[in-house]
Image (cartoon, rainbow, N blue to C red):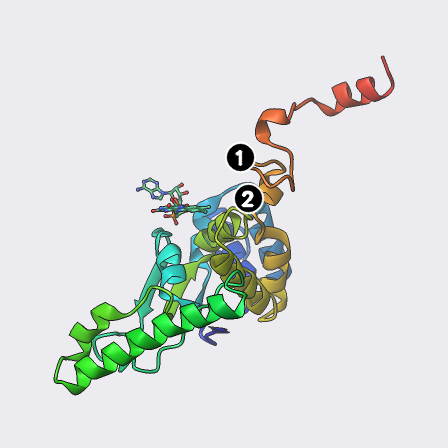
Amino acid sequence: MIEVLNITEKNPLEHIGMVAGICWNSPVDNPEKNRKRAVSCINSGHGRVMEYAGAELVISGYSARCIRELYTHIIGTTRLQESTRYVNMEDFKYYVPATVESEKQKATYKECMSSIAESYSSLIESGVSKEDAANLLPLGMDTKIVLKINLRALIHFMEMRLCTRAYKEIRALSAELKKVLSEYSEEWKFIADNYFLPKCEAAGFCIEEKCCGRKPKKSDIVIISKEEYEALKSGK
Ligand SMILES: Cc1cc2nc3c(=O)[nH]c(=O)nc-3n(C[C@H](O)[C@H](O)[C@H](O)COP(=O)(O)OP(=O)(O)OC[C@H]3O[C@@H](n4cnc5c(N)ncnc54)[C@H](O)[C@@H]3O)c2cc1C
């Protein structure tokens, strides 16, 4: 589950356009003009202005392994995570991938998780501290984080993690993040629709070695001018 903390501004584009306008000595009291200026900056790849806007989110119900992947995105993010030193994790929940589907597979998976939970509880009962018993806990265990991320980092995160090459759990997290932000305000919806895209959609081609085929590979693309294209089309 992802909650957008209400401290997150509803009008990130107005904010971006305002700071950009200040730098150009333009009037910044018109929200519509600010929004237009923001979109122009983003489309022109003027990345720094995007760092003025961002979101604060509570992300829960995803595995520690998935969150570890999120943590590889080190630029433009600040995070705090549920403590395994102070929180009792006896009743931890965990991720079950869809490929663990037969009754036998599900039973094996569940048995292992239950065994970890039992060992954890028994160590705590025998006097081992939570922070030490926590070393038993699995990567598949659900965790909770508070993530602060600026818009520049968010767009990059979506490009990487909505890609079909990303692992399915973090892809699900990215898709949920896109959904909750697009429901947060009109401006976030515009951003989500236009900029929260896998990198192939953003670039128009794929740079992954193992391409899923959604877009052509970069090596299979030839860039020609509009004039050349028109000439080819008309057979001249
Ligand atoms: C399909 C997939 C598989 C992956 N597999 C693995 C794996 O097996 N093991 C693993 O450890 N990780 C793996 N990763 C994570 C990946 O290697 C990156 O760590 C992750 O994408 C975050 O890094 P980033 O550069 O994209 O983003 P960020 O760290 O958020 O950086 C954003 C941008 O800032 C710039 N930047 C970042 N750091 C610097 C710097 N130090 N100096 C200058 N500029 C910088 C770059 O332009 C970068 O694109 C995988 C990612 C994907 C999508």
Front in this rendered view, residue 28 or 221: 221
**Point 46% across, 45% down: residue:** 47
**Pointer 1 local density, CA inside 10 Å: few below 14, some 14–19, many at least 20:** some
**Pointer 2 local density, CA inside 10 Å: few below 14, some 14–19, many at least 20:** many
Taking the view exactly as shown, the residue that stands out farthest to the right is 234
Taking the view exactly as shown, the residue that stands out farthest to the front is 104
Q: Which percent across, then down, holds residue 138? A: 31, 67
Mark 2 and mark 1 in contact (Cβ < 8 Å)? yes
Taking the view exactly as shown, the residue that stands out farthest to the bottom is 125
Q: Which percent across, then down, holds residue 132? A: 16, 73
Where ligand 1 lies, by image quadrant? top left
Look at the image and tell me whether residue 152 can be seen.
Answer: yes
The amino acid type found where label 1 is placed reads Ile
Front in this rendered view, residue 70 or 165: 165
Q: Which mark is residue 199?
A: 2
Q: Which percent across, then down, holds residue 68? A: 35, 58
**Position of 192 relative to 132 (above/below):** above
Q: Is residue 228 left or right of residue 77?
A: right
Disc 1 to disc 2, C-alpha distance: 8 Å
Position of the C terminus, as image quadrant, is top right
Q: Which residue is mark 1?
A: 207
**Point 55% across, 59% down: residue:** 13
Q: Is residue 206 left or right of residue 106?
A: right
**Position of 134 relative to 205 (above/below):** below
Q: Earlier in the sequence, mark 1 or mark 2?
A: 2
Front in this rendered view, residue 205 or 4: 205
The amino acid type found where label 2 is placed reads Lys
Q: Secondary structure at mark 2?
A: helix
Q: Quadrant of residue 220?
A: top right
